[in-house]
Image (tube, rainbow, N blue to C red):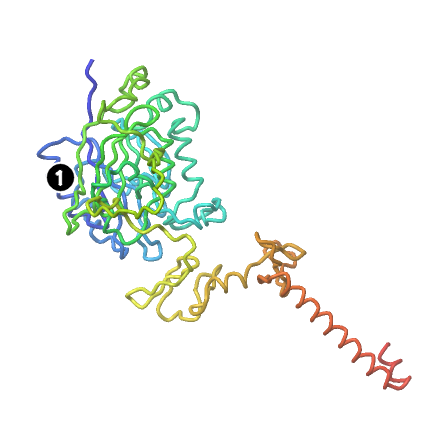
Amino acid sequence: MAQDKLKVLFVGDVEGRFDEIFTQVNAVNAKAGPFAAMLCVGRFFAPDGCSDALMPYLTSEKRISVPTYFITGDEDPGKGSTSLVDDIQDGGEVCKNLTFLGRAGAKRLPCGLSVAYLSGAYKPDKYALDAAFAGRRNAKTLAPHYISSDVDEIVRAARGGEDGEENEEFSLAGVDVLLTAEWGEKFDALLPDTMSHPLASATEDNLSPAVTRLATEVAARYHVAGTEGAYFAPPPYRNALHATRFYGLGKVGNAAGAKSLVAVAVTPTAQLALDAARTGARDGGDACTPCPYTYERPKPRVAEPEEDAEPEEDASTPAAAVGPAPRDHNAPKRHEDLPSGEWKCGMCGNVNRAHQQKQCHMKKCGAPREGDLELWRMQNMSFNGRGAKRDADGAIVNALGGVRGAGGGEGRVYSMMSKAEAEAAAAAAAAERAAAAEEEAAKRAKMTAKERTSLDV
Protein backbone atom coordinates (compact mmCIF):
# COMPACT_ATOMS: atom_id res chain seq x y z
CA MET A 1 0.00 0.00 0.00
CA ALA A 2 1.43 3.37 -1.01
CA GLN A 3 2.13 5.71 1.83
CA ASP A 4 0.80 9.27 1.80
CA LYS A 5 3.49 11.91 1.52
CA LEU A 6 3.38 15.36 3.11
CA LYS A 7 4.68 18.41 1.28
CA VAL A 8 6.90 20.38 3.65
CA LEU A 9 8.86 23.63 3.31
CA PHE A 10 12.21 24.28 5.00
CA VAL A 11 13.23 27.94 5.50
CA GLY A 12 16.50 29.51 6.69
CA ASP A 13 16.98 32.59 8.90
CA VAL A 14 13.94 34.87 8.55
CA GLU A 15 15.50 37.66 10.68
CA GLY A 16 12.27 39.66 10.80
CA ARG A 17 11.50 39.57 7.04
CA PHE A 18 8.04 38.21 7.79
CA ASP A 19 6.13 39.88 5.00
CA GLU A 20 8.69 38.77 2.42
CA ILE A 21 8.69 35.09 3.38
CA PHE A 22 4.95 34.77 4.04
CA THR A 23 4.08 36.46 0.74
CA GLN A 24 6.46 34.12 -1.08
CA VAL A 25 5.11 31.03 0.66
CA ASN A 26 1.49 32.03 0.03
CA ALA A 27 2.29 32.19 -3.68
CA VAL A 28 4.15 28.85 -3.63
CA ASN A 29 1.33 27.19 -1.72
CA ALA A 30 -1.28 28.46 -4.20
CA LYS A 31 0.77 27.16 -7.12
CA ALA A 32 2.25 23.88 -5.85
CA GLY A 33 0.42 23.18 -2.56
CA PRO A 34 -1.13 22.39 -0.34
CA PHE A 35 1.87 22.23 2.01
CA ALA A 36 1.33 20.60 5.38
CA ALA A 37 3.94 22.61 7.28
CA MET A 38 6.73 25.18 7.02
CA LEU A 39 9.71 24.72 9.34
CA CYS A 40 12.00 27.72 10.00
CA VAL A 41 15.53 27.48 11.44
CA GLY A 42 18.16 30.01 12.53
CA ARG A 43 17.36 33.52 13.70
CA PHE A 44 13.64 34.08 13.28
CA PHE A 45 13.27 37.59 14.74
CA ALA A 46 14.86 40.85 13.56
CA PRO A 47 18.34 41.66 14.96
CA ASP A 48 17.16 45.07 16.20
CA GLY A 49 14.22 43.53 18.08
CA CYS A 50 11.55 45.22 15.96
CA SER A 51 8.48 43.03 15.32
CA ASP A 52 6.33 45.63 13.54
CA ALA A 53 6.40 43.57 10.32
CA LEU A 54 4.63 40.75 12.15
CA MET A 55 1.84 42.94 13.50
CA PRO A 56 -0.56 42.52 10.49
CA TYR A 57 -0.41 38.75 11.04
CA LEU A 58 -0.93 39.05 14.80
CA THR A 59 -4.06 41.14 14.20
CA SER A 60 -5.32 38.83 11.39
CA GLU A 61 -5.09 41.68 8.90
CA LYS A 62 -2.92 39.33 6.84
CA ARG A 63 -2.92 35.55 6.92
CA ILE A 64 -0.31 32.80 6.90
CA SER A 65 -1.52 30.12 4.52
CA VAL A 66 0.81 27.30 5.67
CA PRO A 67 1.08 26.17 9.31
CA THR A 68 4.49 27.54 10.33
CA TYR A 69 6.74 26.24 13.11
CA PHE A 70 9.98 27.94 14.11
CA ILE A 71 12.92 27.87 16.49
CA THR A 72 15.20 30.77 17.43
CA GLY A 73 18.95 31.34 17.20
CA ASP A 74 21.06 33.70 19.27
CA GLU A 75 18.61 36.63 19.17
CA ASP A 76 19.49 39.24 21.80
CA PRO A 77 16.83 39.35 24.57
CA GLY A 78 18.26 42.70 25.68
CA LYS A 79 16.84 44.28 22.54
CA GLY A 80 13.45 42.65 22.98
CA SER A 81 13.97 40.31 20.02
CA THR A 82 12.29 37.38 21.77
CA SER A 83 9.51 39.32 23.51
CA LEU A 84 6.79 37.43 21.61
CA VAL A 85 7.99 34.05 22.88
CA ASP A 86 9.38 34.92 26.34
CA ASP A 87 6.13 33.72 27.92
CA ILE A 88 6.00 30.47 25.92
CA GLN A 89 9.56 29.18 26.27
CA ASP A 90 8.36 25.58 26.12
CA GLY A 91 6.43 26.27 22.92
CA GLY A 92 3.09 27.75 21.97
CA GLU A 93 1.05 29.59 19.37
CA VAL A 94 2.05 33.17 18.52
CA CYS A 95 -0.88 33.71 16.16
CA LYS A 96 -2.94 31.62 13.77
CA ASN A 97 -0.67 29.25 11.80
CA LEU A 98 2.47 30.52 13.56
CA THR A 99 3.87 28.38 16.40
CA PHE A 100 7.08 28.54 18.41
CA LEU A 101 8.30 24.96 18.95
CA GLY A 102 10.12 25.84 22.15
CA ARG A 103 13.60 25.78 23.64
CA ALA A 104 14.35 22.07 23.17
CA GLY A 105 12.52 18.79 22.73
CA ALA A 106 10.80 16.42 20.32
CA LYS A 107 7.15 16.24 19.39
CA ARG A 108 4.71 15.21 16.66
CA LEU A 109 2.97 18.01 14.78
CA PRO A 110 -0.77 17.92 14.01
CA CYS A 111 0.00 16.97 10.38
CA GLY A 112 1.76 13.82 11.60
CA LEU A 113 5.35 15.00 11.13
CA SER A 114 7.74 14.26 14.03
CA VAL A 115 10.38 16.91 14.80
CA ALA A 116 13.28 17.27 17.22
CA TYR A 117 14.41 20.85 17.78
CA LEU A 118 17.01 22.99 19.57
CA SER A 119 16.74 26.78 19.86
CA GLY A 120 19.70 29.00 20.71
CA ALA A 121 23.43 28.99 20.03
CA TYR A 122 26.46 27.24 21.48
CA LYS A 123 28.60 29.12 23.97
CA PRO A 124 31.24 27.08 25.84
CA ASP A 125 31.01 28.83 29.21
CA LYS A 126 27.19 28.55 29.22
CA TYR A 127 26.86 25.02 27.83
CA ALA A 128 28.33 23.25 30.86
CA LEU A 129 26.11 25.03 33.40
CA ASP A 130 23.05 23.42 34.92
CA ALA A 131 19.65 25.10 34.64
CA ALA A 132 19.90 26.94 37.98
CA PHE A 133 23.25 28.59 37.28
CA ALA A 134 22.34 29.33 33.66
CA GLY A 135 19.56 31.64 34.84
CA ARG A 136 16.80 29.31 33.64
CA ARG A 137 14.91 29.19 36.93
CA ASN A 138 12.02 31.67 36.67
CA ALA A 139 13.71 33.28 33.65
CA LYS A 140 11.61 36.08 32.14
CA THR A 141 13.36 36.06 28.76
CA LEU A 142 14.32 33.26 26.39
CA ALA A 143 18.04 32.56 26.80
CA PRO A 144 20.06 33.00 23.57
CA HIS A 145 22.32 30.05 24.45
CA TYR A 146 21.36 26.46 25.21
CA ILE A 147 22.89 24.23 27.87
CA SER A 148 23.87 20.55 27.94
CA SER A 149 20.66 19.48 29.67
CA ASP A 150 18.71 20.85 26.69
CA VAL A 151 20.58 18.45 24.41
CA ASP A 152 20.04 15.59 26.87
CA GLU A 153 16.32 16.35 26.81
CA ILE A 154 16.17 16.18 23.01
CA VAL A 155 18.01 12.85 22.85
CA ARG A 156 15.76 11.43 25.56
CA ALA A 157 12.56 12.72 23.92
CA ALA A 158 13.56 11.61 20.42
CA ARG A 159 14.26 8.10 21.66
CA GLY A 160 11.28 7.74 23.95
CA GLY A 161 8.57 10.06 22.69
CA GLU A 162 7.07 13.17 24.26
CA ASP A 163 6.25 11.50 27.58
CA GLY A 164 9.86 10.38 28.02
CA GLU A 165 8.77 6.73 28.31
CA GLU A 166 9.82 3.94 25.97
CA ASN A 167 8.09 4.44 22.65
CA GLU A 168 8.54 1.71 20.04
CA GLU A 169 7.72 3.94 17.08
CA PHE A 170 10.25 6.65 18.03
CA SER A 171 12.96 4.16 18.96
CA LEU A 172 12.59 2.13 15.76
CA ALA A 173 11.71 4.83 13.23
CA GLY A 174 13.46 7.91 14.63
CA VAL A 175 12.16 11.39 13.83
CA ASP A 176 11.32 12.99 10.51
CA VAL A 177 13.18 16.29 10.94
CA LEU A 178 15.91 17.62 13.24
CA LEU A 179 15.87 21.44 13.46
CA THR A 180 18.88 23.39 14.80
CA ALA A 181 19.98 26.98 14.46
CA GLU A 182 23.63 25.99 13.85
CA TRP A 183 25.55 23.50 11.75
CA GLY A 184 27.48 20.77 13.56
CA GLU A 185 31.22 20.47 13.85
CA LYS A 186 32.72 17.92 11.40
CA PHE A 187 29.88 18.37 8.90
CA ASP A 188 32.66 18.75 6.29
CA ALA A 189 34.61 15.59 7.23
CA LEU A 190 33.74 13.95 3.90
CA LEU A 191 34.13 17.08 1.79
CA PRO A 192 36.55 16.40 -1.10
CA ASP A 193 39.67 18.54 -1.13
CA THR A 194 38.86 19.57 -4.68
CA MET A 195 35.49 21.00 -3.67
CA SER A 196 35.21 24.59 -2.47
CA HIS A 197 34.23 24.80 1.18
CA PRO A 198 30.65 26.09 1.69
CA LEU A 199 31.85 28.26 4.60
CA ALA A 200 35.09 29.46 3.01
CA SER A 201 34.02 33.10 3.34
CA ALA A 202 32.88 32.79 6.97
CA THR A 203 34.62 35.21 9.32
CA GLU A 204 33.93 33.31 12.54
CA ASP A 205 33.34 29.76 13.68
CA ASN A 206 29.68 29.13 14.59
CA LEU A 207 29.87 25.34 14.32
CA SER A 208 28.50 23.54 17.36
CA PRO A 209 29.74 20.32 19.04
CA ALA A 210 26.29 20.00 20.63
CA VAL A 211 24.65 19.84 17.19
CA THR A 212 27.23 17.21 16.23
CA ARG A 213 26.03 15.11 19.14
CA LEU A 214 22.38 15.51 18.12
CA ALA A 215 23.11 14.64 14.50
CA THR A 216 24.90 11.52 15.72
CA GLU A 217 22.47 10.30 18.38
CA VAL A 218 19.10 11.35 16.91
CA ALA A 219 18.12 9.31 13.86
CA ALA A 220 16.47 11.98 11.71
CA ARG A 221 15.53 11.65 8.05
CA TYR A 222 16.22 15.36 7.54
CA HIS A 223 18.47 17.77 9.41
CA VAL A 224 17.93 21.47 8.69
CA ALA A 225 20.12 24.31 10.02
CA GLY A 226 20.69 28.03 9.43
CA THR A 227 22.85 30.86 10.85
CA GLU A 228 25.74 30.49 8.38
CA GLY A 229 24.00 32.34 5.52
CA ALA A 230 25.09 29.65 3.05
CA TYR A 231 23.33 26.83 1.19
CA PHE A 232 24.74 23.31 1.43
CA ALA A 233 23.04 20.00 0.58
CA PRO A 234 25.49 17.06 0.59
CA PRO A 235 24.52 13.48 -0.32
CA PRO A 236 22.49 11.67 2.35
CA TYR A 237 24.49 9.87 5.02
CA ARG A 238 23.70 6.79 7.06
CA ASN A 239 22.45 7.05 10.62
CA ALA A 240 21.56 4.30 13.08
CA LEU A 241 18.19 3.56 11.43
CA HIS A 242 18.05 4.92 7.90
CA ALA A 243 19.51 7.93 6.05
CA THR A 244 19.77 11.63 6.87
CA ARG A 245 19.66 14.45 4.34
CA PHE A 246 21.26 17.65 5.58
CA TYR A 247 20.18 21.11 4.40
CA GLY A 248 22.16 24.16 5.42
CA LEU A 249 20.01 27.13 4.35
CA GLY A 250 20.79 30.78 3.60
CA LYS A 251 19.04 33.81 5.04
CA VAL A 252 15.73 35.01 3.60
CA GLY A 253 16.33 37.79 1.08
CA ASN A 254 20.14 37.44 1.15
CA ALA A 255 22.06 39.44 -1.49
CA ALA A 256 24.34 36.52 -2.40
CA GLY A 257 21.43 34.48 -3.73
CA ALA A 258 22.00 31.52 -1.36
CA LYS A 259 18.94 29.27 -1.38
CA SER A 260 16.79 29.88 1.69
CA LEU A 261 13.65 27.88 0.80
CA VAL A 262 13.47 24.14 0.04
CA ALA A 263 10.41 21.96 -0.61
CA VAL A 264 10.41 18.23 0.16
CA ALA A 265 7.88 15.38 0.23
CA VAL A 266 8.01 13.35 3.45
CA THR A 267 6.26 10.15 4.48
CA PRO A 268 5.81 10.55 8.27
CA THR A 269 7.33 7.87 10.43
CA ALA A 270 3.88 7.30 11.94
CA GLN A 271 2.82 5.85 8.59
CA LEU A 272 5.91 3.72 8.08
CA ALA A 273 5.68 0.06 9.03
CA LEU A 274 8.07 -0.72 11.88
CA ASP A 275 9.66 -3.57 9.94
CA ALA A 276 10.41 -1.14 7.08
CA ALA A 277 12.00 1.26 9.56
CA ARG A 278 14.30 -1.52 10.75
CA THR A 279 15.57 -2.17 7.22
CA GLY A 280 15.62 1.49 6.20
CA ALA A 281 19.30 1.96 7.04
CA ARG A 282 20.14 1.48 3.39
CA ASP A 283 17.58 4.04 2.30
CA GLY A 284 19.37 6.19 -0.24
CA GLY A 285 21.14 3.32 -1.97
CA ASP A 286 24.69 3.65 -3.18
CA ALA A 287 24.47 7.45 -2.92
CA CYS A 288 24.50 7.15 0.89
CA THR A 289 27.79 8.10 2.54
CA PRO A 290 29.10 7.26 6.02
CA CYS A 291 28.10 9.61 8.82
CA PRO A 292 30.50 12.60 8.62
CA TYR A 293 30.22 13.28 12.35
CA THR A 294 31.69 9.89 13.30
CA TYR A 295 33.90 9.43 10.26
CA GLU A 296 37.63 9.19 10.88
CA ARG A 297 39.65 10.06 7.80
CA PRO A 298 42.36 7.38 7.32
CA LYS A 299 45.88 8.66 7.69
CA PRO A 300 47.82 8.58 4.41
CA ARG A 301 50.79 6.27 4.26
CA VAL A 302 53.98 8.27 3.96
CA ALA A 303 57.04 6.59 2.49
CA GLU A 304 60.27 7.11 4.36
CA PRO A 305 62.35 9.75 2.55
CA GLU A 306 65.68 8.75 1.08
CA GLU A 307 68.79 10.15 2.68
CA ASP A 308 69.73 13.65 1.52
CA ALA A 309 66.54 13.77 -0.57
CA GLU A 310 65.04 17.22 -1.03
CA PRO A 311 61.24 17.52 -0.62
CA GLU A 312 59.43 18.14 -3.88
CA GLU A 313 56.81 20.83 -4.28
CA ASP A 314 53.74 19.98 -6.34
CA ALA A 315 52.01 23.17 -7.35
CA SER A 316 49.27 21.20 -9.12
CA THR A 317 47.98 19.63 -5.90
CA PRO A 318 44.87 21.55 -4.76
CA ALA A 319 44.81 22.89 -1.25
CA ALA A 320 42.40 21.29 1.20
CA ALA A 321 39.05 23.00 1.58
CA VAL A 322 39.13 25.36 4.52
CA GLY A 323 36.32 26.86 6.50
CA PRO A 324 36.12 29.53 9.20
CA ALA A 325 38.93 29.92 11.71
CA PRO A 326 38.46 27.65 14.75
CA ARG A 327 36.56 29.16 17.67
CA ASP A 328 38.98 30.48 20.28
CA HIS A 329 37.46 29.25 23.55
CA ASN A 330 40.22 31.01 25.51
CA ALA A 331 39.75 34.42 23.93
CA PRO A 332 39.69 37.22 26.55
CA LYS A 333 36.28 38.58 27.46
CA ARG A 334 35.59 42.09 26.18
CA HIS A 335 32.68 44.48 26.15
CA GLU A 336 31.03 45.13 22.79
CA ASP A 337 30.26 48.68 21.67
CA LEU A 338 26.90 48.96 19.90
CA PRO A 339 26.08 51.51 17.16
CA SER A 340 23.50 53.30 19.29
CA GLY A 341 26.06 54.18 21.97
CA GLU A 342 24.96 51.28 24.15
CA TRP A 343 27.42 48.55 25.11
CA LYS A 344 27.05 44.83 25.67
CA CYS A 345 28.69 43.40 28.77
CA GLY A 346 31.37 40.82 27.99
CA MET A 347 30.68 38.95 31.23
CA CYS A 348 26.88 38.53 31.32
CA GLY A 349 25.71 39.77 27.89
CA ASN A 350 23.52 42.53 29.35
CA VAL A 351 22.98 45.54 27.06
CA ASN A 352 23.71 48.74 29.00
CA ARG A 353 22.49 52.20 28.00
CA ALA A 354 24.88 54.88 26.81
CA HIS A 355 24.87 56.78 30.12
CA GLN A 356 25.76 53.67 32.14
CA GLN A 357 29.51 54.03 31.67
CA LYS A 358 30.82 53.09 35.12
CA GLN A 359 29.86 49.42 35.30
CA CYS A 360 27.37 46.84 34.02
CA HIS A 361 23.87 47.67 35.25
CA MET A 362 22.97 43.99 35.74
CA LYS A 363 22.62 43.62 39.52
CA LYS A 364 24.33 40.24 39.75
CA CYS A 365 27.20 41.29 37.47
CA GLY A 366 28.58 44.80 38.01
CA ALA A 367 31.56 44.32 35.66
CA PRO A 368 33.53 47.58 35.20
CA ARG A 369 33.22 49.41 31.88
CA GLU A 370 37.01 49.80 31.64
CA GLY A 371 39.83 47.46 32.59
CA ASP A 372 40.74 43.79 32.32
CA LEU A 373 37.58 41.70 32.77
CA GLU A 374 39.42 38.45 33.52
CA LEU A 375 41.46 40.14 36.25
CA TRP A 376 38.29 41.68 37.69
CA ARG A 377 36.55 38.29 37.65
CA MET A 378 39.40 36.57 39.50
CA GLN A 379 39.62 39.36 42.07
CA ASN A 380 35.91 39.06 42.79
CA MET A 381 35.58 35.29 42.95
CA SER A 382 33.40 34.62 46.00
CA PHE A 383 33.52 31.44 48.06
CA ASN A 384 31.85 30.35 51.29
CA GLY A 385 34.61 27.94 52.26
CA ARG A 386 36.55 28.56 55.45
CA GLY A 387 40.09 27.82 54.33
CA ALA A 388 42.32 28.96 51.50
CA LYS A 389 41.68 27.40 48.11
CA ARG A 390 43.99 26.07 45.43
CA ASP A 391 43.41 26.22 41.69
CA ALA A 392 43.84 23.34 39.22
CA ASP A 393 47.60 23.98 39.09
CA GLY A 394 47.99 23.89 42.87
CA ALA A 395 48.50 27.64 43.30
CA ILE A 396 47.11 29.10 46.52
CA VAL A 397 43.94 31.18 46.27
CA ASN A 398 44.51 33.66 49.10
CA ALA A 399 41.74 35.27 51.19
CA LEU A 400 41.65 39.07 51.11
CA GLY A 401 38.75 39.83 53.43
CA GLY A 402 35.33 38.86 54.68
CA VAL A 403 32.01 39.59 52.99
CA ARG A 404 28.54 38.30 53.69
CA GLY A 405 27.90 35.13 51.64
CA ALA A 406 24.68 34.19 49.89
CA GLY A 407 24.01 31.44 52.40
CA GLY A 408 24.06 33.80 55.36
CA GLY A 409 27.54 32.80 56.59
CA GLU A 410 30.72 34.83 56.50
CA GLY A 411 32.13 34.37 52.98
CA ARG A 412 35.53 35.42 51.68
CA VAL A 413 36.82 37.14 48.59
CA TYR A 414 39.84 35.44 47.05
CA SER A 415 42.53 36.48 44.61
CA MET A 416 44.92 34.17 42.77
CA MET A 417 48.46 33.96 44.24
CA SER A 418 51.36 31.67 43.68
CA LYS A 419 52.52 29.61 46.64
CA ALA A 420 55.63 31.78 47.12
CA GLU A 421 53.56 34.99 46.99
CA ALA A 422 51.08 33.63 49.53
CA GLU A 423 53.86 32.56 51.93
CA ALA A 424 55.53 35.97 51.60
CA ALA A 425 52.20 37.71 52.25
CA ALA A 426 51.60 35.55 55.32
CA ALA A 427 55.10 36.30 56.68
CA ALA A 428 54.60 40.04 56.11
CA ALA A 429 51.25 39.92 57.92
CA ALA A 430 52.83 38.05 60.85
CA ALA A 431 55.67 40.60 61.07
CA GLU A 432 53.16 43.43 61.02
CA ARG A 433 51.19 41.86 63.87
CA ALA A 434 54.40 41.32 65.91
CA ALA A 435 55.45 44.95 65.38
CA ALA A 436 52.03 46.17 66.49
CA ALA A 437 52.25 44.01 69.63
CA GLU A 438 55.70 45.37 70.48
CA GLU A 439 54.49 48.96 70.01
CA GLU A 440 51.54 48.31 72.30
CA ALA A 441 53.84 46.77 74.94
CA ALA A 442 56.17 49.81 74.77
CA LYS A 443 53.26 52.19 75.27
CA ARG A 444 52.04 50.25 78.31
CA ALA A 445 55.56 50.25 79.80
CA LYS A 446 55.63 54.07 79.78
CA MET A 447 52.29 54.35 81.57
CA THR A 448 51.99 54.86 85.30
CA ALA A 449 50.50 52.11 87.42
CA LYS A 450 47.31 54.14 87.78
CA GLU A 451 46.98 54.59 84.01
CA ARG A 452 47.50 50.87 83.36
CA THR A 453 44.88 49.96 85.97
CA SER A 454 42.29 52.30 84.43
CA LEU A 455 43.09 50.95 80.94
CA ASP A 456 42.67 47.33 82.08
CA VAL A 457 39.32 48.17 83.68
Of residues 196 and 158, the one nearer the viewer is: 196
Residue 94: x and y, percent?
A: 28, 43
Q: Could one spot residue 215 in this view of the protein? A: no
Amino acid identity at mark 1 = Asn
Of residues 407 and 62, the one nearer the viewer is: 407
Residue 360: x and y, percent?
A: 43, 64
- For image coordinates 19% across by 24% down, the residue present is 5
Q: Residue furthest right?
A: 449
Q: Callout 1: few (<14), some (14-19), or many (20+) C-alpha neighbours within 10 Å? A: some
Of residues 324 and 22, the one nearer the viewer is: 324
In the image, 142: left or right of 442?
left
- For image coordinates 20% across by 32% down, the residue present is 8
Which quarter of the rendering shows the C terminus?
A: bottom right
Q: Could one spot residue 447 in this view of the protein? A: yes
Which quarter of the rendering shows the N terminus?
A: top left
- Count of marks overlaid on the render: 1
Q: Residue furthest left?
A: 31
Which residue is label 1 attached to?
26
In the image, 291: left or right of 36?
right
